[in-house]
Image (cartoon, rainbow, N blue to C red):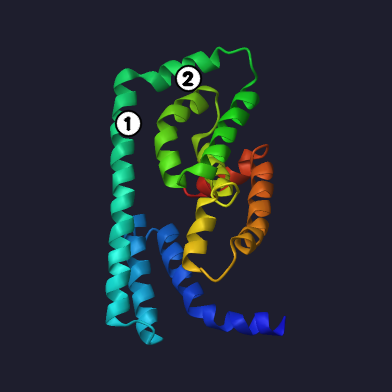
Amino acid sequence: WRERILSLGGVGETLLLFILVMGGLFAGFFTPTEAGSVGDGGAIALAILRRRLSWRGFVQAMLESTRISCMVLVIVAGATIFGHFLAITRIPYTLANWVAGLPFPHWAIMAVIIGVYLIGGCFLDALALILLTIPIFYPVVTKMGYDPIWFGVIIVLVTQMGVITPPVGVNVYVVSGVAKEVPLESIFKGALPFLISLVLASLILIPLPQLALFLPGLMR
């Protein structure tokens, strides 16, 4: 435990950066996009102060950031086109009316939707899964009377379960690609506490939506 406590000594600057970004965001000093820029600038400043940033490392980081940004933009572009297609065909609204008339309780339909996100998260990137399915499921959920903010919190938790769960576990393989010396089995075992915490959080928030809506309610 002594070594663990001493190892926390180097996270002070990172914690300060986190407080700066999240605090400024929730206080309304800047938008989420601007918060990302503040976080980037703070991270670069910390790396320079710690003398851990070389020109070569900076260029590599910029190239990797560009690659990831392009990937995200392609996903968003595809999801936007898909969303326009659904809006023109009105498939989500037809589906919502059909689901609302089914002889099943709403909680059973919601369980199926959550199951889709849990299983899909095992095989697809979380952002891509959410962007592609929200135009379909959002009208269904609101038609059944569920709060959209609560639904958003739940699907984020559930998709995060999927990305660290076998058989695929996208995030686990990302970590394995970075830390090649660590066995894949060890990474899955290390992700187990996070998986358990996500399951417990979901089991609490699903029957108690007020917990998920408390903080958003204070910001209105």
What crowding class fits label 2: few (fewer than 14 Cα within 10 Å), some (14-19), or many (20 or more)?
some
**Percent x, y of residue 170:** 50, 51
Q: Amino acid at mark 2?
A: Ala
Q: Which mark is residue 174?
A: none
Q: Amino acid at mark 1?
A: Phe
Q: Residue furthest right?
A: 1
> Is residue 220 something one can see in this rendering?
no
At a point 35% along the width and 69% down the height, the residue shown is 40
In front: 138, or 31? 138
**Percent x, y of residue 78:** 30, 38
Q: Viewer-nearest of labels 1 and 2?
A: 1
Question: Is residue 64 shown left or right of residue 11?
Answer: left
Question: Which of the two labelled residues, at mark 1 and mark 2, occupies the earlier sequence position?
Answer: 1
At a point 50% along the width and 43% down the height, the residue shown is 123
Q: Name the residue beneath numbered marker 1.
A: 82
Q: Are marks 1 and 2 in contact (CB under 8 Å)?
A: no
* Quarter occupied by the N terminus: bottom right
Secondary element under disc 1, as helix, strand or loop, is helix
**Percent x, y of residue 87:** 32, 24
Question: Is residue 207 shown left or right of residue 89?
Answer: right
Q: Above or below — where is 25 with respect to 59?
A: above
Q: Which mark is residue 96?
A: 2
Q: Above or below — where is 121 with respect to 34?
A: above
